[in-house]
Amino acid sequence: MISKKLFSLLIFSSIYITLVAQNVEVYPMHWWVGMKNPNLQIMLHEDKIADKIPMIKMPETGMKIGEGVMLVNIERVENSNYIFFDVRITKEAKAGKYNFVFGSGDKRISIPYELKERRKGNGTLYAQGITSSDFIYLLMPDRFSNGDTTNDRIAGMRDQSLNRDSIFLRHGGDMQGVINHLDYLKDMGVTTLWMTPVLENDMPNRTEHGYAFTNEYRIDPRLGGEKAYLQLSDEVHKRGMKLIQDAVYNHVGSFNTFFVLDPPAKDWLHQWPEFTQTNYKDQPLFDPHAAPSDAKKMSDGWFTKQMPDVNQSNPLVANFLIQHAIYCVEEFGVDGWRIDTYIYNDLDFMNRCNKALTDEYPHITMFGEAWVHGTANEAYFAQNNINTKFKSNLQGVTDFQCLFYGIQPALMQPFGWTDGVNKLYTTLSNDFLYVDPMRNAIFLDNHDLSRWYSVVDSSIQKDKMGFEWLLTERGIPQMYYGDEVLMGGYTDPDGWVRLDFPGGWNNDKVNAFTGEGLTQDQLSVQSLIKTLANFRKNSSALKTGKLMQYIPVNGLYVYFRYDNEQTIMCIMNTSDKQQTIDFSKYAERTNGFSQAIDVLNKSTYNISSAITIDSLQSMVLELKK
């Protein structure tokens, strides 16, 4: 288990061996041989542990622990409850158990540590990366399905709530519940699972969302703990699917052991004379006219009083966070990394962390939450083509621009020179700012936003148009749990967009997994997503093809996804009138084809003749010769 490992420090005397029970926590609890980076920093935590490790003069070459394993430095810090070992693990090192031994005679101390063989994947891949060929399903484990009622409450944890009638208390969902319904997700066309954080959140309240870590090296036992996470990873990969971990570097929970309750040093957090909150303004980070104090408050201010800000410029903190990221990928077989509150981090640290992951796992991909306004603002935080002093190495972002300045106004604003669907057209025209916009995750909503069905005023037509866009647009499509059955809600407060998935609990009257109790509208949306997502799985044009868009006319927007093997024509009529489609107007992409087959209803059209599309309707057509 990944929990506090209880080791015994052995004090040997010349006459007999005495076992002294000591609760020494060692982080990371184990490591692996064969890593590309030979350096490892081990953190030991226990009452006055620094006083129990004798002061020694380290040889210049380090102290040999075993073949290929050298202790090169011992670092003491402000808090004597911590000590850090800098270790070098060369390619000669073998998997096995090692001992860090200090002193002699009755002062002899031995601290065991294990190096393991690297993950083989049990015949499956891991750290594969998430690409535009994937379809991501985002869920909150506590609100998706309760597969194991024995972990609903865990003795000793601060939050003992369990009340499904409350939008803020725990509801009992867990990773076993997710495992139970992986086949449902796969059948719907989902290729990738993203859960909100599964690390321990031992906070007094609001623990259902998972974003306030209290121990980075412990999987929350209310979700099933390490055993369930490992099983979930295995079950995901057995189905040919992928796993994303939700990472939080910027802040921790106010009851975090290492950063708040008993930190190695005060500067593990950004400290202010009085509580100082971030200004939530991204502009000072790149504004050539910005006041430095605004930039500092943005990056170093606390997210909330309950979420203190981590000082990533401290080398020990940086190592702790980076090693933990690598640990999770190797230990749990993670394929992709979603980084929460990306823009609030120390961006130089993030470049270093991203590189450490890709150095170790060349195929792994990361996308960061960049909740900003403006394509240039958003592109700044990813690999971009902008001439700025700071250059991000982040592969992609959560594309809020395609949402706020794209699909939302396209369907909710009247058409105009710069309004309505012209906003979507304009936003996509700015893709030249990104090195690779296909690595951006596009979405209609998430756990922090009002649900898509509510945003479009409960219009079934607009709801479906949104999903037809999502699954045909460039980038990596991501859907929020329950959207397939028209779950609604506004973020005032956020608990209303985090309700239980119907059918995830015994005795639910409506079961979205089986279809029991669903309305015809719900079933029709679920069917649309399933049909289009599974078509997309085998569509080279939609997965990796190029995008060509035509200037919208009178609310009619036409774009193509195409490659050498396939051409898909997408039509959105955002106006309140029926419109005519003359294929010859799009000759660059329609020449050479004779037929158009509707992907959703299989209707066939002759390209030599015009067709009509009703108001507030979309069409996805595969062109055939």
Image (spheres, grey):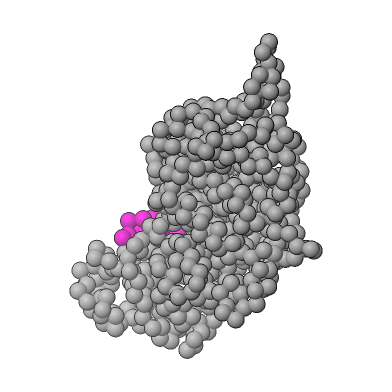
Q: Report x, y in % for residue 86.
A: 56, 40
Drawn side of residue 143 relative to residue 61, left or right:
right
Q: Position of residue 297 (x, y in %)?
A: 68, 68
Tag count:
0
Main structural element of the magenta stretch: helix, strand or loop? helix
Magenta span contains residue 533: yes
- Left or right: residue 95 versus residue 586 is right
Residue 240 seen in this snapshot: yes
Q: Residue at x 48, y 74 (%)?
A: 388
Residue segment shown in magenta? 526-540
Res 516 visible: no
Question: Does 278 sit above or below residue 86?
Answer: below
Q: Residue at image x 47%, y 51%?
A: 357
Q: Residue at x 39, y 40 (%)?
A: 124
Question: Viewer-proximal residue, 379 or 604?
Answer: 379
Instruction: Relative to 378, say whether 446 is above or below.
Output: above
Tell me which residue sits at (44%, 70%) in the image.
384
Q: Farthest residue toward the top?
A: 15
- Residue 283, image quadrant: bottom right
Residue situated in front as seen by the camera: 579 or 420:
420
